Image (cartoon, rainbow, N blue to C red):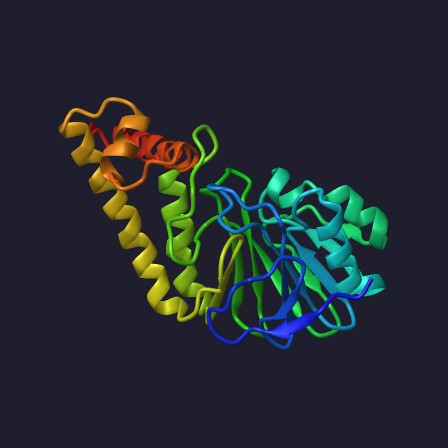
Amino acid sequence: METTEEEEVGPEPIVPGVARALSPLVRRILALNPSARNDIGTNTYLVGIDEIVVIDPGPEDVSHLDSVAGCGGDRIKWITWTREGAEYTGGLKAMAERTGAVVLEPTDGDTILGTEFRINIHAMPGPTPDHHGFLLEEERMLFCGGLMADGRPAPLVPGQSNVADLRASIERMPKMRLRRIAPGHGYIIEEAKKAIPAELELRDQIDAAVLAAVKDGASTPREIAASTNPDITDDETLAVLADSAAVHLEHLKSLDLV
C-alpha cells in the first residue's frame, strides 16, 4: 500500500495516515486514536531512507499499520519505542510481523546505526520509569515521547509519572545541543533552546496552581483540576487533568509543601 507523503510547512492540520516529511531523514504518520490524553493522536516516526527505524509504532489499528508499512515497506529494519502502552506500542507485534523488522527494546547508551543516520538512546524517565528519548545525531532532533508536547503540558499518570524525574530529564536536554524536539503527540517543537526552559517554567506554574488550589480547600485531584481549570467542563478532559494534578500533588508532598 502506498501512502501519500507531504512536506510539513507551518502548523497545518496533521492528517492521520498521511506521511509528512519533517526533514530529509524524518517522516511522521499520525495514528487515528485521538482522546483527551492523546490529543489528536499518537505520532509514529520513521527515520532513515534506505534503512528505516520506526519509533513508537502506535496503536493496533489496521489503517495505521497499513500507512506505516506502505510508507517504509521492506526498508523498515527496526521498531522501537519511547514508552510502552496501547497508544505507543499496541501495534508493535503486528507491525513487526508485517515488515519483518527487528524489535529493539530501548536501552540507555545503545546506538541505532542506519546507512544515513546515528541515533543515541537515552534513559529519560518522568512520564514512566522506563521512558526513553532518541537523539538523531545528524539533525540534533530528540524524539521525546511523553516528556513534552507542543502547546500544552504532557499529561501525567498516577503511579507511573514522577515530576522530579521529569524535570531532571528535561534539564538534561540543553547538553544535547538540540535543534528540534519531536513529541509523542502534536507538532514538532521548534526552537528547542526556548522550549526547554519554557517547559520547566510551565511545570513550576502547575505546581504553584496545585498548591494554591489545596490552600483554597481543594482536597482531591478532581477538585484541584476543576479549580485550576474553571473553563473546562468536559469529564474526559477533567479526568486527564486530575491525573496530572495527582502527580504534581505527590511531588509537592515529597517536598513537604502540603
Along the line of sight, the residue nearer the viewer: 130 or 62: 62
Q: Is residue 183 left or right of residue 50?
A: left
Q: Quadrant of the N terminus?
A: bottom right
Up the image or down, 222 lies above or below 89; here it is: above
Residue 236, image x and y in percent? 44, 34
Task: Give the residue at x 29% y 51%.
Answer: 202
Q: Is residue 223 left or right of residue 117?
A: left
Along the line of sight, the residue nearer the viewer: 253 or 6: 6
Task: Give the residue at x 56% y 73%.
Answer: 8
Task: Give the residue at x 54% y 53%.
Answer: 184
Q: Is residue 255 left or right of residue 85?
A: left
Residue 244, image x and y in percent? 37, 36
Residue 250, image x and y in percent? 32, 29
Whether residue 84 appears in this view of the structure is: no
Residue 84, image x and y in percent? 61, 40
Along the line of sight, the residue nearer the viewer: 76 or 7: 7
Whether residue 72 appears in this view of the structure is: yes
Q: Residue furthest left?
A: 216
Along the line of sight, the residue nearer the viewer: 247 or 177: 247
Q: Quadrant of the C terminus?
A: top left
Task: Give the residue at x 36% y 60%.
Answer: 196
